[in-house]
Amino acid sequence: MKLKLRKIAYQLHLWLGLTSGLIVVIMAATGCILSFEEELKHIVHPNRYFVENIGQKRLSLSELTKKAEKALPEGLKVKRVIIPSDPAQTYIFRTLKMDNQAWTYWGTYIYYYRIYVDPYTGKVQEVEDAKKDFFEIVLDLHRRLLLGEKIGKTITGYSTLVLAIILFSGLVIWYPRKMSKSMLKGMFFIKISANWKRINYDLHNVLGFYSVIPLLIISYSALIWSFEDADKWIKNALNGNSPTEKKVKSIIPSEEFSNREHILNLVGNTMEKGLKDKRSALINFPRSEEGTYYAELTYDGRQYRNEQFNFDQYSGSIVKSQSYKNQNIGYGTALRERNYDLHTGSILGLIGRIFYFLTAVIATSLPITGFIIYLNRKKKKPKHQKNKIVYPSHH
């Protein structure tokens, strides 16, 4: 029975690895690049992210929004703003429109602009066509292979599922049929003094084992984004009898509404006051007549550690607010809110991000070392043993 399981695991590991290897390399390599995206951007483009002089007082959010919209191509409106707590940083406004039916990266983004504004002077420091941003292209390659939401996301989604199967089958193969002292050493250590073939095998076998748990967590969090039904099922199963959250709406006034600037300033002021001891604030502008201003105050580099607010777009009143500290939500919703931080390693802070970066480096190497093992075995196989399966050993 054990031998049969080992044979199945080996065949799965081999053929799934060969068919999905290139996609795994792309996803892992792009994950490495994105690990420290924000820090790298601050170094490469300081003129975007930092003001020339820190002023005494910031302009109102409505004034800054006007200046950002004036810098945009005609007719486009701002849809989001990020307000940093660091007084030396710019406000980042954004407008974005996507076509989820498109087949390519360039077709997916109808337009995507980021506007960097000095909050003290209102000076627009840069209007960035984010479609051309290197990190945005890398992110789309990571998520969709530059093939659009419909095709690319489906391919990466199923490739992630395949990766999870490869990881489980790899664990079955990794565990030796007979345990001995030399076997034990081969399971956990790379024999540097050996020939290059053995070193390559150890790199695949040993590093694969050490990275398996973080890679399974990364795979799980990616699958949650890729498969909506699985996401809902896990959330509902873990939530149990927790009440379902209702979507909040703005109350549309009977007479004409012309107080938009005042409401925007009210939302902006509330967020700025709450920024003390926080990292940043995010405000999403209403997308419909019933929509609200959705705002978040983020405590640190972990996205789930935040306070959330919904403001009525006509009265400015807070229609809903909650903090991650005292949310009355089920385990499923709580896990879902931590999904991004699970995927990036930021759930463990900077140490987690560094650890995940190293895991992504290993994940990039695994299909390559695995392919080299396959080629070496193919060359080594005698002609009369052509159809015989050779299993990996730790000798």
Image: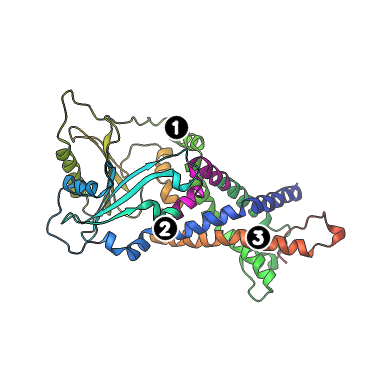
User: Is residue 55 at all visible to an observer of this figure?
Assistant: yes
Q: Magenta stretch mostly in which secondary structure?
A: helix
Disc 3 residue type? Gly
Q: Residue 5's spot in the image, x, y percent?
A: 72, 48
Name the front one of labels 2 and 3.
2
Which range of residues does the magenta coloring cover? 138-159
Q: Which residue is mark 3?
A: 370
Residue 152 magenta: yes
Q: Earlier in the sequence, mark 2 or mark 3?
A: 2
Secondary structure found at label 2: helix
Q: Is residue 368 left or right of residue 334?
A: right
Q: Earlier in the sequence, mark 3 or mark 1?
A: 1
Which label belongs to residue 134? 2
Disc 2 residue type? Phe
The picture quadrant where one finds residue 330 is top left
Q: Residue 104's spot in the image, x, y percent?
A: 49, 46
Disc 1 residue type? Gly
Q: Residue at x 41, y 46 (%)?
A: 338
